[in-house]
Image: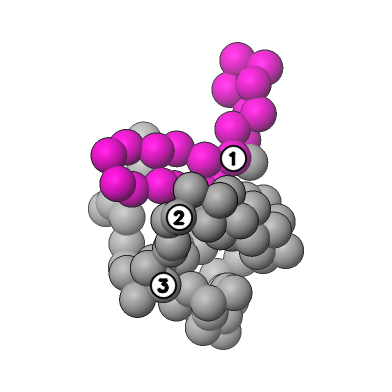
Amino acid sequence: SITIGGSKISNLRFADATTLIAASQEELVALLNVLEQHSAAYGLGINYNKTKVNIVDREHDNNREIKSIGRCEVSFKALCTSVL
């Protein structure tokens, strides 16, 4: 999660897309579990064939060893070409 203006944010949503924000692999798995439970309560599910994880880590470049988190595939496609 990140903190913006004193508010802790662990997810962003737009239309049918949800972005989970986590500081660790364990936190992400916990967020995925919560999302799955709350979705199921409304008869919804997560399409894990379309679900991807992007790891952004400024300090370590060795995250390419991680192939999946939970039932989600880890993607190494760049989200953008530069960060301002």
- Which image quadrant is residue 12 in? top left
Q: Pointers 1 and 3 in contact (CB under 8 A)?
A: no
Residue 76 seen in render: no
- Residue 26 lies in quadrant: bottom right
Q: Report whether 49 appears left or right of 25.
A: left
The residue mark sitting in front, 2 or 1, is 2
Amino acid identity at mark 3: Tyr
Write down the quadrant of residue 61 in the picture. bottom right
User: Measured along the vertical axis of the image, is residue 39 above or below residue 65?
Assistant: above
The disc label shown at residue 48, or none: 3
The secondary structure that dominates the magenta segment is: strand
Mark number displayed over residue 10: 1
Residue 5 visible in the current orientation: yes
- Above or below — where is 31 with respect to 84? below
Q: Nearer the viewer, mark 1 or mark 3?
A: 3
> Dot 2 corresponds to which residue?
43
- On the image, the x and y values in percent for residue 25 come to 67, 65
Which x, y percent locates residue 67? Answer: 51, 83
Q: Which residues are magenta?
A: 2-21
